[in-house]
Amino acid sequence: MTISSRNCRKGAPIMDFLCSVCGKRQGEPQGWRLVIELGKPGSEIRNTLFILDHWDEKKALESNTARLCSSECEEKYLAVRHQQLVA
């Protein structure tokens, strides 16, 4: 999973989100995109349902969501998904 938690000075956990493509750690959520997918039964293929160009922390925590730091990483991510569909 691309989410981790760490403690801040006061002991409260902080969620870290990592880009699903390049592994970059999220600083500010501006410019980050979320790709929400649904698995295809009986295969490892996942169908893209939505691409959100605004940060939604609740959606970012869901296991069927990819977190992407840039449009370049979004293009790479979707290209891999497209190759899985046509293969």
Image (cartoon, rainbow, N blue to C red):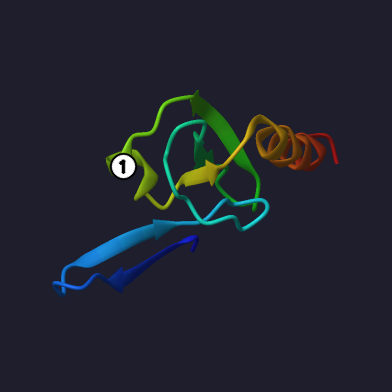
17 up-or-down from 40: above or below: below
At x 59%, y 55%, the residue is 24
Question: Residue 75 at x, y = what percent?
Answer: 73, 32
35 with respect to 75 (left or right): left
* Rendered image quadrant of residue 68: top right
Q: Residue furthest front?
A: 9
Image check: 45 left or right of 57? right
Tag count in the figure? 1
Residue 64, image x, y percentages:
45, 47
Instruction: Say which residue label 1 marks.
Output: 57
Circle 1: residue type = Glu
Q: Nearer the viewer, residue 82 or 13?
A: 13
Residue at x-position 42% and y-position 26%: 54
x 52%, y 45%: residue = 66
Quarter of the rendering containing residue 22: bottom right
* Label 1 Cα crowd, 10 Å radius (few <14 / some 14-19 / many 20+): few
52 or 16: nearer the viewer: 16
Counting from the top left corner in percent of width and height, residue 16 is at 40, 59
Q: Residue at x 52, y 56 (%)?
A: 25
Work out which quarter of the rendered image holds the C terminus and state it: top right
Residue 14, percent from left and from top: 28, 62
- Tag 1's secondary structure? helix
